[in-house]
Image (cartoon, rainbow, N blue to C red):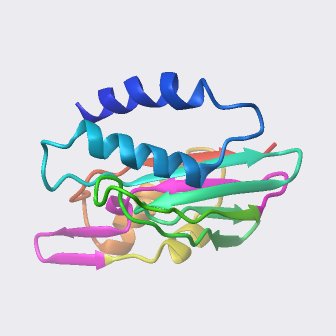
Amino acid sequence: MITSILKAVIYPEYVQLAKPGEFSPSAFLGWLNERINFELRKTSGLLITFFAGVINVKSGYIAYSNAGQTHPYILRQDTAIELPVSGTSLGFSNSVLYSEQSAPIRKNDVITLYSDGLTEITGRGIHAQITPQELFSEVPYGQDYHSRLLQKALEKAGAREFSDDVTLLSARIV
């Protein structure tokens, strides 16, 4: 249901009407938060985490804002660089001002977004908290990158499976 609402609202009401070059991740999250609060006003206790970013390869920057999602990372050669900006999850409060930051990007950088299921693994006597910095630094980008990240996380936790859902998204700057 939530995915359907987001799809039905975001594209026709915001993205399609945004003028080229004027998309602000923080303004978008503020707008989306208000819409989520309106659409889900009869639902209590539901929070949605969301990361919004705009990659501008011409300027060499990513502008981003965060609503409770884990912090993304830029993988640059052998270094994992955290994109540290936090904000309130969507649906928590009616009026929220989200902060926006930017970071330089370079050719061959890999921007990786992930859900907390990747780094928080529990179950059967296991409670592992894996640092993303360590995980991303140990797994170089390349063929089967996501599969290797998943395997490394399980290996570090000493687990056979994930206890929570895991979402991974990465984009390589070419």
Whole-percent x, y for residue 88 in the image:
39, 65
Q: Is residue 83 visible?
A: yes
Q: Nearer the viewer, residue 112 or 39?
A: 39
Whole-percent x, y for residue 124 in the image:
10, 70
**127 sits left or right of 120 in the view:** left
Q: Residue furthest right?
A: 58
Which residue corresponds to the image point at 31% horizontal and 26% vertical from the top-left? 4
Whole-percent x, y for residue 125 in the image:
12, 77
**57 sits left or right of 138 in the view:** right
Q: Which quadrant: the N terminus? A: top left
Which residue corresponds to the image point at 47% horizontal and 45% vertical from the top-left? 31
Whole-percent x, y for residue 105 in the image:
79, 58
Q: Please, is residue 37 above or below residue 73 in the view?
A: above
Q: Nearer the viewer, residue 135 or 68?
A: 68
Q: Dividing the picture into quarters, in which one does residue 69 lie?
A: bottom left
Q: How many numbered discs?
A: 0
**73 sits left or right of 4 in the view:** right
The segment highlighted magenta reads 104-128
**49 sits left or right of 47 in the view:** right
Q: Dividing the picture into quarters, in which one does residue 121 lie?
A: bottom left
Q: Is residue 145 visible?
A: no
Q: Which quadrant: the C terminus? A: top right
